[in-house]
Amino acid sequence: MAEQLINALSYPPIQRAAIACVLCGASCSLLSVFIVLMKMPLIGVSMSHAAFAGAVLGLLLNFDPFLSGLIVCLLVAGVLGPLSDRTDIAPENVLGIMFSFLMGVAFLGMGILTRTKAGALNLMWGSLLTLSASDIVILGLITSVLVLFVFFFFKEIRSVLFNRRLAASSGVPERLIYYALLFLTGAVVSSNLATVGGLLIFALLVQPGATALQLTYNLKHFFLISAASGIGACVSGLIVSYIFDLPSGASVVLMATTLFAAAYIFSPKRRSAKLRKRSISHEDVAR
Amino acid sequence: MNKNIIELSDITVRKVKNLLLDRISLSVSPNEFVGIIGPNGAGKTTLLNVIAGFERFEGTLNLFGQRETWARSRETRLRIAYVPQLFQIDPVFPISTLEAVMTGAVGRLRLFRSPGKQEREKAMRLMEMMRVAHLADRPLGQLSGGERQKVSLARAILQQPDILLMDEPTANLDIAVQKEVLNLINEIHKRETLTLLFVTHDFNMLPTAMRRAILMNHGKTVFDGDINTALSGEMLSRLFQYPLQTFERNGRRFVSYG
């Protein structure tokens, strides 16, 4: 079987799919750290629908679907930032409204599209084997920007993740970090539309971070575990889909869920919390 | 030359049709310890938010002799530290107690520079002062409410501010822990050169070092002066619209809820 996989890797479309898998896993899982720790999973849903709606509009207007998806994502990020900073509207409500509006736009576009529905469906479910070299270059560039952002702004990121208001009050450019994060989410989601698709990308924006949350109290390790679980889910999902001839996007998401379930069951954090609870109740009895 | 570190003139804050602050004017001198006291909804936290730069406002605000708006420069933000009410943190959140304290130093560090040995030592010294040094490696989410408030104080002092704003820092804590936190605040006032603003609605839990009280109600100041004069039964009964009596012990006034 290993030989079969190595043989498959000699074909350029499979090579591109493998590279895209690693980049998709890395970029989505790094973002998922923010999404999980800031408790804003709706950002992932809103952005993936923005990218999807933009790409459908692109198909309708004979425009590059990646570019139109990216433009709509960046526009949504530009609107979301200032809106979620307003104290008279709850950020969850802003995201909920944005998400449903964009889904409406996407499905309206799908309804109008008559000839190229297959292209739109590819955007929804992803199609790893039809990726072009330029898709990979764009994905690589955006992933690099995200990695550099995390590396160079780690201390500011930690402050913002801990408490946005305290970060702002202690002179950290909190708004800049938050808005950069929104724009990067838009860029990552739109560049990954062709790999796992607009619907399934949401899973990769949440599950690697949720997996890391079960395993470590150290933020640096958190980023590394999240990236490893995201890349692991993408690569193993691709292998499973190749061997069993299954849809790649769905296989990737199911592998990510399996990794999360394993981390949850064997979580040392949960086990130590249980032990602590038990020792506290023993102390109570002793008293 | 103007000696006041904080000066508010006709500060008004509106939210939709509600007037949260109604033409507030006051000034605070360097190293003063001021209590802002009033019932819920009096505008105490909004006043603190205006000074901290969290709230848009109308009127004139001068900080350190400079006119300021809602949007602040990094330099001004660095000079004002903020200790919030006890806030919830996920018990599994990936941050240790020492790392949480060290977030106070991040604003002072240049871009691309990580907190080093110097910041770590300073943070540990402050954690010793706040009696939480033994918890340095413990995840912050596993600390009790009182311990977390002590961490908040250490984080704020590490910022090396000129003004320390505290928004009900003893709220939701046990009485013994409240007393301990108040003693630490007194110690901070004694050891650091700081102007302190302390918001509370509990007039029996005031730091002893506090000498001046500003009583607020319905977005206005109703009294500004000596703390012992502020704590008169008549004044507080009117403020809280509830019959209150005061008595004196060890040179301090306390309030009886009768």
Image: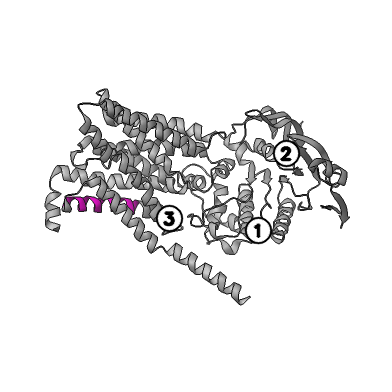
Q: Is residue A1 magenta?
A: no
Q: Chain of mark 3?
A: A
Total numbered labels? 3
Q: Note whether residue A63 is visible.
A: no
Q: As shown in the figure, which amino acid type bears the numbered disc 2?
A: Ala
Where is residue B143 drawn, in percent x and y? 57, 60
Where is residue B19 drawn, in percent x and y? 69, 30
The quadrant holding residue A96 is: top left
- Tell me the quadrant of the picture where the C terminus of chain A can be found: bottom right
Depth order, front residue of A6/B243: B243
Mark 3 lies on a secondary structure that is helix
Q: Which residues are magenta?
A: A227-242
Q: CA distance from mark 3 to mark 2?
A: 40 Å
Q: CA distance from mark 1 to mark 2?
A: 31 Å
Which of the two discs, 1 and 3, sits closer to the camera? 3
The secondary structure making up most of the magenta span is helix
Q: As shown in the figure, which amino acid type bears the numbered disc 3?
A: Leu
Q: How is the image coloured?
A: one colour
Mark 2 lies on a secondary structure that is loop
Residue named by callout 3: A213
Residue named by callout 1: B130
Q: CA distance from mark 1 to mark 3?
A: 29 Å
Co-location on one chain, circles 3 and 2:
no
Query: Mark on residue B42?
Result: 2
Residue under the image location 25 percent in, 33 percent down? A120
Mark 1 or mark 2, earlier in chain: 2
Depth order, front residue of B232/B105: B232
Residue situated furthest front in the rendering: A111
